[in-house]
Image (cartoon, rainbow, N blue to C red):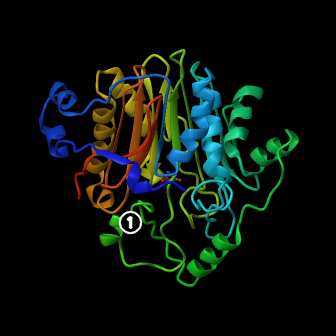
Amino acid sequence: MFDRRKFIKATAISASLLVVDKKSIASVIQSSKVSAGTKPIVISTWDFGIPANQAAWKVLSSGGRALDAVEAGVRVPEADPNIQTVGYGGLPDRDGHVTLDACIMDEFGNCGSVAGIEHISHPISVARLVMEKTPHVMLVGDGALQFALENGFKRENLLTKKSEADWREWLKTAKYAPVMNIENKSYDKVAPTKLPGNQYNHDTIGMLALDAKGNLSGACTTSGMAYKLHGRVGDSPIIGAGLYLDNEIGGATSTGVGEEVIRNVGSFLVVELMRQGYTPEAACKEAVMRIIKKKPDIAKNIQVGFLALNKKGEYGAYAIQTGFSYAVCDEKKNDLLIAGKSYYN
Ligand code: SD4
């Protein structure tokens, strides 16, 4: 296990979001911090991005393709039963089904996705197969499972004893009340009263990589919001919402309450803002601000974070609430950073 504190090397304190409202695009761009550009580089959401980036780096550092790097990277949390928000061991929906969402996108604009897939521990690899072996972009539910089984994936029980116990505890109240930033213990201070059944229950891995040839790819995978309605699909498998990239510009991915990301086509928006000249951080901040402006009452109590990487290898992040961690790995480092101080805290 890595020591989280050791990796928190920098805190990008951003100008108040109110500035975004009042000033011109040019001043927003100026006010945001810009990381040094480098390649190859891989970035990913939350603390589990550190071991995920390590796996991706093995591919990138030997001259491999960004697409192979992001797939290898996100397979790490997918396989880890202790991560209850991604892949095997993910918390189930309210009926006890572990249903997974994932998508992947390459430098040519190809993409593949699965939503609500059960019994398969590596949905990202199924998504890649959808992209490479079918004329489609997205397969859902039973159809996605059938496709995976027909292509040699093993059927597994993804519900671990721990996640089942948490779900049974949750059933006692059956109150859907997602709590954000599960890894950021300082957030406990402002989190709602602890609820039964592990309500610290959402954190998706989104990963973006730029390889030595200067090509971008991205991946996003999650078990979604714990105790969601059976059949609910979040932003993570939706191209443009949970993940988007344009190899000429950059890429973006999201984490948090997916409904708000879908409503704002969040990752597409971040990439289009970078096309207009926004830095990665300023683009993430503007996308967050759109959510806050539309629904301030909802936004106050939820987390949504965006992470972005541009074609030069510059990166940035921003989230509604303080406490969004992300991992950055290049030739010199594999650091955990915290996105800038937010509008609310
Ligand atoms: C969803 N965005 O299903 C995912 C959940 C999650 O960090 O991220 N969280 O809405």
Quarter of the picture holding the C terminus: bottom left
From the image, tell me which residue sits under label 1: 185
Look at 68% across and 69% down and name the residue there: 96
Up the image or down, 116 lies above or below 278; here it is: below
Q: Is residue 151 left or right of residue 73?
A: right
- x%, y% of residue 176? 49, 71
Image quadrant in which you'd find residue 168: bottom right
Look at 27% across and 34% down and name the residue there: 282
Image quadrant in which you'd find residue 26: top left
Up the image or down, 42 lies above or below 38; here it is: below
Three-letter amino acid code at the position of disc 1: Lys
Q: Is residue 339 left or right of residue 1?
A: left
Element class at badge 1: helix
Look at 37% across and 78% down and name the residue there: 193
Q: Who is closer to the viewer here, 74 or 247?
A: 74
- x%, y% of residue 317? 35, 40
Q: Is residue 22 left or right of residue 90?
A: left
Q: Who is closer to the viewer here, 98 or 13?
A: 13
**Some atom of ligand 1 lies within 8 Å of the CB belonging to the residue at label 1:** no
- x%, y% of residue 177? 45, 70
- x%, y% of residue 234? 54, 51
